[in-house]
Image (cartoon, grey):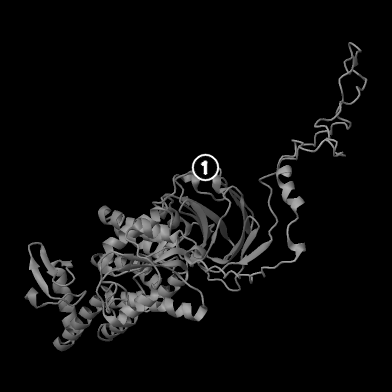
């Protein structure tokens, strides 16, 4: 069989021969010759040549769509379903269809069911796209696929994808992709000016200002194209200022910046509220008159900024200082008085002569013939008569003739206030009902956090319990003694204490004591079988609810229905820019606690 007549089973591209085998000219995937021949022969048994060409064409279109900067899920779903009309079991069509569905259930099921041995050559493509759509629900399935595929087979690929996963999961947990997160500046720019944009953003964020940049703060995976403008508008609404990188590129009719500018103008007209605007001029621009009128109206009355320092200074100015000062009110001038004035209005001569005398009160300058009743008051108080007091010295009794100026006894010192008990639990004054994916701040890390978790298993002879994993940025627990559960109820750094009872657990957490390497703390409920039989059904958690008190706020999760799973990641504490926050993941998984522990670096035998 002539290899050049074959098409790529991944993207439908042309196959070319190389020294090491053969490679797709379009997607550049390497293939072994015998593998490619087997796939071609299997395809020829299912489809005639005309249909094979149609499938190859559809695969090429699909590959172009998944390579777009922002994924168009509607088009991808259409192409996948057309391919599956010819080849119902096609691997890539099945994966991209699952990955672009509205919910994560199809993707999670697909990832968990992949046979890594028979599909090893395709795992990298699956992971690359899955990482673009990573979220709190599918995160664990993606991580498990990396572990299953590469941990024991290819350490280089394992390290590469584990690093990518750690970086992407950190962004998800830190709300980097949340357009509704309040920020200081929305950066409006052309992608052709990206180098200048990066320098500006680096400077602003190094000086403490949070920026929204579309290429960085929007996910590029599932439904990215469909949600693009909705997310952009939300980001503009939640940013204090609008910073425009002004250049010929950004003022072009073909650039999306004009739509962002028009949205701000429209919102200002509807709400009557002005958005703070900054124009950062990086080059003299030339634009068409029609679009220039929009920009002129948008920045009317504002001065250019020519460097990042000036942009920063402008952003630090308050909204009141940006408004021009009101014009001074006109001064009313009284009408001129007539020249002939009444005698009463003239100042008496005596008053005119008294002025210099009042200025020199202490220098009498009076006529000897004029009698004065003025008697100057003494500038001192007369010394009081001595009060005879008896000395308090018991050894000698003497009379003390020193004048006593204090007629009242000295007050006794007030008793010192009792020290406050910092560990005393405050009374909750606010209750918040928790939903999946919700996040919350932790304002005071010195205060203890009080947690109460109730749970039950679906089998009478199963054991349900809480497992707490303090993990580092690498996603691993520092040591086995840091894992907190019924057999080890206090973490090594003494920051976590667990008291476990029959169907519930009480936990206290003091984040100020956590090890500096701990990046997040995960709270998982899981069920264990009391019998060591592999044929026995796996026990599952059929209910779980909790309360979590931070300061005076009580967070409550008490669902009316519950997804029965082997384990459930209820919530986690994580660091974001030096501060601790809560992520209520409430994510059910079908992995047992042994497998989960192994994933966090604790070797547990099944």
Which residue is more in the foreground, 188 or 334?
334
Is residue 33 something that shows in the picture?
A: no
Which residue is more in the foreground, 282 or 301?
301
Question: Relative to residue 255, is residue 519 depicted above or below?
Answer: above
Q: Quick check: 156 left or right of 571?
A: left
Question: Relative to residue 51, is residue 228 depicted above or below?
Answer: above
Which residue is more in the foreground, 543 or 38?
543
Is residue 128 something that shows in the picture?
A: yes
Q: Quick check: 167 left or right of 452?
A: left
Circle 1 — which element?
Answer: loop
Taking the spot 92% from the left edge, 22% from the top edge, the residue there is 387
Taking the spot 27% from the left edge, 53% from the top edge, the residue there is 155
Q: Quadrant of residue 392?
A: top right
Query: Looking at this rendering, what residue extends furthest in the top direction?
Result: 396
Q: Quadrant of residue 594?
A: bottom left
* Rendered location of residue 81, percent (x, y): 30, 84
Question: Relative to residue 254, is residue 606 depicted above or below?
Answer: above
Question: Relative to residue 393, is residue 122 depicted above or below?
Answer: below
* Rendered location of residue 66, percent (x, y): 27, 74
Q: Which residue is mark 1?
A: 492
* Rendered location of residue 569, percent (x, y): 50, 61
* Rendered location of residue 129, percent (x, y): 31, 69
Q: Quadrant of residue 115?
A: bottom left
Q: Residues within 10 Å of mark 1 (few under 14, many from 20)?
A: some
């Amino acid at each position: 069989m002539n290899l050049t007549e074959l098409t790529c089973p991944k993207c439908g591209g042309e196959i070319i021969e190389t020294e090491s085998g053969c490679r797709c000219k379009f997607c550049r995937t390497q293939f072994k010759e015998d593998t490619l021949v087997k796939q071609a022969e299997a395809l020829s048994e299912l489809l005639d040549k005309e249909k094979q060409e149609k499938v190859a064409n559809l695969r090429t279109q699909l590959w172009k769509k998944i390579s777009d900067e922002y994924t168009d899920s509607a088009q991808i779903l259409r192409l996948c379903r057309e391919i599956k009309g010819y080849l119902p079991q096609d691997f890539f069509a099945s994966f991209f269809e699952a990955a672009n569905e509205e919910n994560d259930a199809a993707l999670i099921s697909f990832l968990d069911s992949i046979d890594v041995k028979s599909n090893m050559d395709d795992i990298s493509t699956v992971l690359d796209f899955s990482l673009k759509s990573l979220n709190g629900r599918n995160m664990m399935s993606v991580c498990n696929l990396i572990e299953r595929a590469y941990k024991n087979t290819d350490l280089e690929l394992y390290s590469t994808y584990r690093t990518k996963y750690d970086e992407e999961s950190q962004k998800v947990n830190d709300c980097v992709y949340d357009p509704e997160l309040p920020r200081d500046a929305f950066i409006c720019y052309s992608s052709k000016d990206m180098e200048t944009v990066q320098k500006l953003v680096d400077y602003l964020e190094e000086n403490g200002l949070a920026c929204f940049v579309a290429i960085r703060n929007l996910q590029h995976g599932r439904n990215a194209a469909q949600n693009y403008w909705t997310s952009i508008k939300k980001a503009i609404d939640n940013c204090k200022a609008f910073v425009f990188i002004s250049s010929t590129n950004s003022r072009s009719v073909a650039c999306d910046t004009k739509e962002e500018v028009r949205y701000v103008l429209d919102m200002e007209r509807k709400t009557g509220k002005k958005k703070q605007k900054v124009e950062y001029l990086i080059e003299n621009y030339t634009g068409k008159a029609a679009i220039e009128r929009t920009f002129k109206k948008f920045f009317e009355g504002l001065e250019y900024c020519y460097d990042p320092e000036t942009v920063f200074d402008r952003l630090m100015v308050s909204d009141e200082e940006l408004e021009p000062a009101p014009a001074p009110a006109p001064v009313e001038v009284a009408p001129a008085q007539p020249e002939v004035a009444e005698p009463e209005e003239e100042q008496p001569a005596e008053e005119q002569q008294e002025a210099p005398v009042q200025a020199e009160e202490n220098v009498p300058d009076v006529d000897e013939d004029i009698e004065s009743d003025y008697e100057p008051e003494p500038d001192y108080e007369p010394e009081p008569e001595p009060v005879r007091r008896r000395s308090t010295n018991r050894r000698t009794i003497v009379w003390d003739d020193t004048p006593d100026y204090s007629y009242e006894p000295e007050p006794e010192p007030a008793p010192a206030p009792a020290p406050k008990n910092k560990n005393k639990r405050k009374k909750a004054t606010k209750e918040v009902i928790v939903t999946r994916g919700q996040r919350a701040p932790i304002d005071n890390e010195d205060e203890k956090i009080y947690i109460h978790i109730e749970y039950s298993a679906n089998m009478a002879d199963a054991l349900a319990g809480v497992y707490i994993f303090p993990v580092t940025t690498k996603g691993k627990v520092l040591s086995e003694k840091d894992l907190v559960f019924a057999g080890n109820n206090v973490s090594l750094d003494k920051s976590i204490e667990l008291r476990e009872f029959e169907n519930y657990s009480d936990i206290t957490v003091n984040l100020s004591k956590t090890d500096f390497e701990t990046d997040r703390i995960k709270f998982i409920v899981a069920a264990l079988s009391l019998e060591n039989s592999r044929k026995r059904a796996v026990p599952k958690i059929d209910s779980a609810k909790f309360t979590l008190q931070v300061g005076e706020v009580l967070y409550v999760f008490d669902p009316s229905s519950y997804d029965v799973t082997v384990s459930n990641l209820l919530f986690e504490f994580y660091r974001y820019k030096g501060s601790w926050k809560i992520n209520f993941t409430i994510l059910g998984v079908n992995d047992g606690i042994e497998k989960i522990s192994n994933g966090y670096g604790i070797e547990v035998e099944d």
